[in-house]
């Protein structure tokens, strides 16, 4: 295909005084800024051809006078060629997608008769990011439950489209009705013409379900959390709400009769039952609402495929697994915080994931037990904590212990308690649980 070059024309009134006819100019005594490309986008291999109205002076290093600068102020790798009245600027490495650059011509540049420019010339330009643009379009259309979306103009190859769509779905939990897609593409180059989305419900059902879901979300935002809470408190409030108001749908999982909603926030918030994807996506939705950085982790737990959350608080990352904090039991409303903001070291005792794909979680500062002074590093600390909780009339005692073999009955007796009690030990994470009668 023939490459089309856009030209910047410079006209000299006296010497090399610039009167550029390519958009609005913002001038000062020392420089002039042309904004024609500031609100549009060019390709990442864009070649600029700058044509003057007179021959330029031969320079040992034309790059000293004509160059491209990135948004950090560093010079971008470009090749600058001068021939008579023309300067050609081409990238030696593709410009970064979505980045803003400046084409700069220094006023010291001279014509062949030795007259310099009177002003420095700056022309900002933006590099298009087709992937980001098409993601935005597809997300908008998915949120509207549109069935067919034409994307030919974005030049997206068929080999990229699956990962692109999956990325949107995995990061937009409110699209709970998505049921897959197919696509049409141009056979010679593999460019996708259009995408046809499938949905698990009719258009009217989706609209009705959205209203129901949004009503519930508004209630939670007004009654479960409030503006006085910090990020940790909001995260904990949503975690606890999910566990107290939903159950893991083990029956339908075992019978292979799970509904599509079991993998969504609709299943958790409206139907009150779901599997791990539903738990994780519900947490994801509210964390996004609170502007708390997070992402889904896809891995395995206890030998089964599993999804949970990675959360960033106060500059550090933590694992959050609401599913594992909602144990399957005949008893209702068993609330645990065993997997609330834990480190790689702790969660890898039961979970497996491709660690290279995710940021490391090494802190325990925002862990539930650490925040609530319920973390014991040795037996003496464990006995001391149990004594303190008994003194405070706590009946349900939960303490995280570090790499410790615990004789719980002996520990409880050493703490001075002489009454009846029941106990358990979560050896996968290291949590001692004691219920005083």
Image: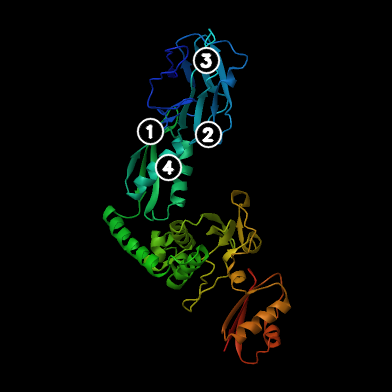
Residue 433 percent coordinates (x, y): 60, 78
Q: Which label was assigned to residue 135?
A: 4
Q: Which label was assigned to residue 116?
A: 3
Residue 390 percent coordinates (x, y): 61, 86
Q: Secondary structure at mark 2?
A: loop
Q: CA distance from mark 1 to mark 4?
A: 13 Å
Q: Residue at x 39, y 70 (%)?
A: 223
Q: CA distance from mark 2 to mark 1?
A: 22 Å
Label pair 1/4, CB-CB below 8 angstroms: no
Q: Secondary structure at mark 1?
A: helix
The numbered mark, 3 or 1, whose residue comes first in the sequence reads 3
The residue furthest bottom is 418
Q: CA distance from mark 3 to mark 1?
A: 46 Å
Residue holding disc 1: 152
Q: Secondary structure at mark 4?
A: helix
Marker count (numbered): 4
Label pair 2/3, CB-CB below 8 angstroms: no
The numbered mark, 4 or 2, whose residue comes first in the sequence reads 2
| In the rendered image, the vertical position of residue 251 relative to residue 137, given as above or below | below
Q: Secondary structure at mark 3?
A: loop
Residue holding disc 2: 96
Q: CA distance from mark 4 to mark 3?
A: 46 Å
């Amino acid at each position: 295909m023939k490459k089309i070059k856009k030209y910047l024309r410079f006209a000299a009134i006296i010497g090399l005084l610039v009167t550029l006819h390519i958009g609005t100019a913002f001038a000062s005594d020392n420089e002039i800024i042309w904004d024609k490309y500031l609100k549009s986008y060019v390709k990442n291999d864009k070649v600029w051809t700058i044509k003057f109205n007179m021959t330029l002076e031969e320079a040992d290093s034309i790059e000293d006078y004509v160059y491209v600068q990135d948004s950090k102020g560093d010079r971008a790798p470009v090749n600058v060629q001068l021939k008579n009245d023309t300067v050609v600027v081409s990238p030696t490495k593709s410009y970064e997608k979505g980045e803003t650059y400046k084409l700069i011509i220094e006023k010291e540049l001279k014509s062949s008769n030795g007259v310099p420019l009177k002003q420095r010339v700056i022309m900002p330009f933006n590099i298009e990011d087709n992937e980001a643009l098409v993601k935005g379009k597809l997300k908008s259309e998915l949120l509207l439950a549109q069935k067919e979306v034409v994307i030919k103009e974005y030049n997206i190859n068929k080999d990229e489209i699956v990962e692109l769509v999956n990325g949107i779905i995995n990061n937009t939990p409110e699209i709970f009705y998505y049921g897959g897609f197919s696509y049409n593409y141009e056979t010679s180059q593999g460019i996708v013409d259009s995408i046809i989305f499938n949905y698990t419900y009719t258009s009217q059902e989706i609209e009705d379900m959205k209203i129901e879901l949004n009503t519930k979300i508004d209630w939670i935002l007004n009654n479960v959390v409030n503006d006085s809470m910090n990020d940790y408190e909001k995260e904990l409030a949503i975690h606890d709400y999910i566990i107290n108001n939903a159950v893991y749908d083990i029956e339908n999982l075992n019978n292979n009769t799970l509904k599509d909603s079991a993998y969504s926030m609709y299943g958790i918030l409206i139907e009150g039952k779901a599997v791990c994807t539903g738990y994780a996506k519900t947490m994801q939705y509210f964390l996004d609402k609170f502007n708390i950085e997070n992402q889904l982790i896809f891995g395995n737990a206890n030998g089964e495929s599993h999804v949970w959350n990675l959360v960033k608080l106060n500059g550090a990352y933590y694992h959050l697994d609401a599913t594992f904090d909602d144990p399957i039991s005949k008893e209702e409303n068993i609330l645990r915080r065993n997997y609330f903001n834990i480190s790689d070291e702790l969660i890898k005792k039961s979970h497996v994931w491709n660690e290279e794909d995710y940021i490391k979680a090494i802190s325990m500062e925002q862990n539930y037990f650490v925040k609530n002074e319920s973390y014991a590093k040795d037996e003496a600390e464990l006995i001391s904590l149990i004594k303190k909780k008994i003194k405070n009339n706590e009946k349900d005692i939960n303490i995280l212990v570090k790499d410790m073999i615990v004789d719980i009955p002996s520990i409880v007796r050493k703490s001075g308690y002489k009454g009846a009690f029941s106990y358990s030990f979560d050896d996968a994470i290291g949590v001692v649980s004691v219920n005083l009668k």
